[in-house]
Amino acid sequence: MAYVTLTLWSAEEMSDEMIATANEKYVPLVMSVGATGVQMVRTGDLTMCVITQYSDAATAAAAQEKIAEVRKQAAGEFTMTMEGVHAGEVFASN
């Protein structure tokens, strides 16, 4: 069964450079640790969420150590704070 993580972030700024770096650097990094998809969604002027899909819970669990490093790197590079993490198995989708 597919598995998804959702992280909530706040940032001191949200620049075009930050968005470009997210696309060029961080999306590929997340994908490289086993994700089947990732979306970074701007939810406000200084807030965003990252939705990451995995094929199953075991793949997600195996990726979490590397994902923690990616999160730490992004938080340092952009002066961002992770406000929350949610995760779970997908039980319905289209």
Image (cartoon, grey):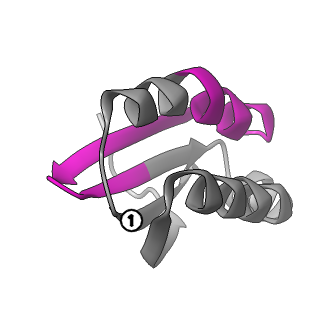
| Magenta highlight on residue 26 | yes
| Whole-percent x, y for residue 79 in the image | 49, 62
* Residue 10 visible at all: yes
Which segment is the magenta one? 24-50
**Residue located at (31% from left, 37% from top):** 15
Which residue is at a point 73% across and 56% down the rendered structure image?
67
- The amino acid beneath tag 1 is Trp
Residue wearing tag 1: 9
Q: At x 69% / y 64%, what residue is drawn?
A: 72
Q: Residue at x 71, y 53 (%)?
A: 70
Left or right for 75, reference 58: left
Confirm whether the magenta stretch covers residue 45.
Answer: yes
Quarter-wise, where is residue 32 in the image? top right
User: Residue 57: where, in percent of width, then height?
Assistant: 69, 61
Total marks placed: 1
Q: Nearer the viewer, residue 47 or 66?
A: 47
